[in-house]
Image (tube, rainbow, N blue to C red):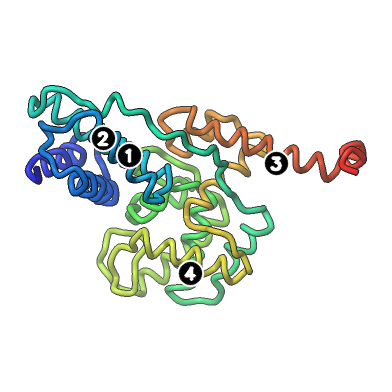
Amino acid sequence: MNTHIDKFLRYLEVEKGASPHTLRAYREDLDIFFDYIKLKASAIELNDIRGFVADQINAGHKKTTVSRRLATIRSFLKFLYREGYIKNNPARLVPTPKLPKTLPKFLSVDDVFSLVEQPGGTGFFPTRDKAILELLYSSGLRVSELTGLDADDINLREALVKVKGKGKKERMVPVGKKAIEAIKTYMVERVLFKKKEAAIFLNRNGTRLTDRSVRRIVIKYARSIGYEGRIGPHTLRHTFASHLLQDGADLRVIQELLGHSSLSTTQKYTHLDITHLMDTYDKAHPLAKDEKK
């Protein structure tokens, strides 16, 4: 079975451009599944997969996690079927658990302004951290896109960054003035660091910063402004999109900036904006106040 999994992961990496993080998640999901059923892929039946899904839910796993694992199983068995290793794909008949509808969380303008101002002083680490926070909010990058940036990907004169998104699709994204200033300041310190590395954002060893390190940086400065909710680099991506929509940006422009392949993925921000508008109405409109009494 490990041979089939290796071939599947190789296919995802080469043909689909899957990231190392995605490949690790797929392997973990498949290891959990096959550890549960203890069968060869050719012997798997519909009830085996249904039993796995039910067991996962009964064990207390989140429905989002169970849905992701089912999607992994579907993709794997579809690959084996297409390659002729199995005669059918029973996973396609298993329904996905219904997921609760949740809106992405985002920061207020005041909170995000306070956040990006937190890294103070000079030196390599404060200037690097400020550049990271400014760029995440300015351009709405995924954390993997940010850590994947090379120094040559940022055009400081044109205020553009070349981003390698999901599936290795490239897009050009504008960078705000504040972020450009922060990056310029950091680049001076980066040169003084004297490390020959293509990556723009480096760790203390002079190598490419990891996604996990960027998450720690965001959490660190969020706590310093007293923000106690769950937060990470993706929160700044949501904040970027939400603030653009609130200021009247076209949904398709936001889709392009975020690198979403489908407009339906971006449309969740319209629901978020409606929630924001209703909250504002309830707090500001005299009749709304009267109705609440």
User: From the viewer's perspective, is the residue at label 4 or at label 1 nearer?
Assistant: 1
Could you classify mark 1 by the number of other residues whose Cα lies within 10 Å: few (under 14), some (14-19), or many (20 or more)? many
Q: CA distance from mark 4 to mark 1?
A: 47 Å
Secondary structure under badge 2? helix
Sequence-first tag of 2 and 4: 2
Q: Amino acid at mark 4?
A: Thr
Q: CA distance from mark 2 to mark 4?
A: 50 Å
- Label 2 belongs to which residue? 49
User: From the viewer's perspective, is the residue at label 2 or at label 4 nearer?
Assistant: 2
Q: Is residue 157 above or below residue 123?
A: above
Q: Nearer the viewer, residue 99 or 126?
A: 99
Q: Residue at x 31, y 59 (%)?
A: 199
Could you classify mark 2 by the number of other residues whose Cα lies within 10 Å: few (under 14), some (14-19), or many (20 or more)? many
- Label 1 belongs to which residue? 53
Residue contact between numbered discs 3 and 4, judged by CB atoms under 8 Å: no
Q: Nearer the viewer, residue 96 or 212?
A: 96
User: From the viewer's perspective, is the residue at label 3 or at label 1 nearer?
Assistant: 1
Sequence-first tag of 4 and 1: 1
Sequence-first tag of 3 and 4: 4
- Label 4 belongs to which residue? 127
Sequence-first tag of 3 and 1: 1
Secondary structure under badge 3? helix
Q: Residue at x 34, y 40 (%)?
A: 54
User: From the viewer's perspective, is the residue at label 2 or at label 3 nearer?
Assistant: 2
Q: CA distance from mark 2 to mark 3?
A: 41 Å
Q: Return the x and y of residue 196 as percentages of the image width and height.
A: 25, 67
